[in-house]
Image: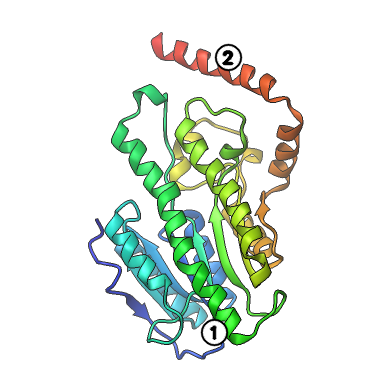
Amino acid sequence: MSETEPSTESARTAPRSHSRRTALVTGASSGIGEEYARQLARRGYDLVLVARRAQLIEELADDLAEQCGVSAAALPADLSDSGDVARLEERLRADGTGDAAPIDLLVNNAGTGGGGEFVRQDPDSVDAMLDLNIRAVVRLARAVLPVQIARRRRAGLGEGDLPRMGVINVSSMAGELAANPGGAVYGATKSFVRLWSESVALEVAGHGVHVSAVLPGFVRTEMTRGVQRRSLPDIAFVAKERIVSESLRAWAAGRTSVVPGQQYKTADGLLRLIPRSLFKTFARRSAYREVQRELE
């Protein structure tokens, strides 16, 4: 549970115009989420920053308000906690008729990785991953999308008219693998996010609302410290700045998914060509070798 309830929004404000846009970013305390906040602030978005670590998002809100002249609010919240999710849903339902600014863009970035062999995973840890990677993502999008559709309808905006509204959901290339031994639950959650996002994107496109799934490969963040210790070559990693800039362009263009980084675009194409049976055979052998190493 967070130290501060999401209803007690801590804001660093700038004078607000009705023409300003507002983005809400989850997992904004570091890594890709922090980079979304920085790039959106430079584009003139006011911000609502969500993360468990209150001090970090409060400091980030101060920094962006000072540097970019935007309004930045810190909402400490634990998205694996149903109470915090419910309070954040209420914030996302703001439609502009009250004091809270309506949300033009929701960035569902918060998530958790990890895993290991499924039969050895702690069931509570599995539940927490499902709560954060799937349930929170779905509930937050469900809260904001009807409001965005209604706002555009009231304003008489057509499918191609500005301002843009919608949702960006951060998935992963791990969800594109035919099998992911050692990361079964994580890969499955990210596969869900991609398929669900692309399906919802087609449902809301006629209302002029964009939904995009982002499929990053390896990126140097706190969540990938274990991967970074494997001494992978630099080409295996995509800079978080590129992930965010490419995904924001793709979302603005109405693309339902984006794979940032040329190396992963190439890998994504190759994955589609490799027969699933062949990939599974390779994955099974790799998993067997990993188990053997643990037993030695």
Q: Which mark is residue 285?
A: 2
Residue placed farthest to the top in the image? 296
Mark positioned earlier in the residue sequence (2 or 1): 1
* Type of amino acid at the residue the image marks with label 1: Arg
Q: Residue 111 vs residue 280: left or right?
A: left
Q: Which mark is residue 185?
A: none
* Residue beneath disc 1: 20
Q: Position of residue 222 (x, y in %)?
A: 43, 46
Q: Is residue 247 visible?
A: no
Secondary structure beneath label 1: loop
Q: Position of residue 221 (x, y in %)?
A: 48, 48
Residue occupying image coordinates x 42% and y 77%? 94
Secondary structure beneath label 2: helix
The answer to which image quadrant residue 234 occupies is top right
* Type of amino acid at the residue the image marks with label 2: Arg
For the C terminus, give its image quadrant.
Answer: top left
Q: Are marks 2 and 1 in contact (CB under 8 Å)?
A: no
In the displayed structure, 91 sits above or below 177; it is below
Residue occupying image coordinates x 59% and y 57%? 200
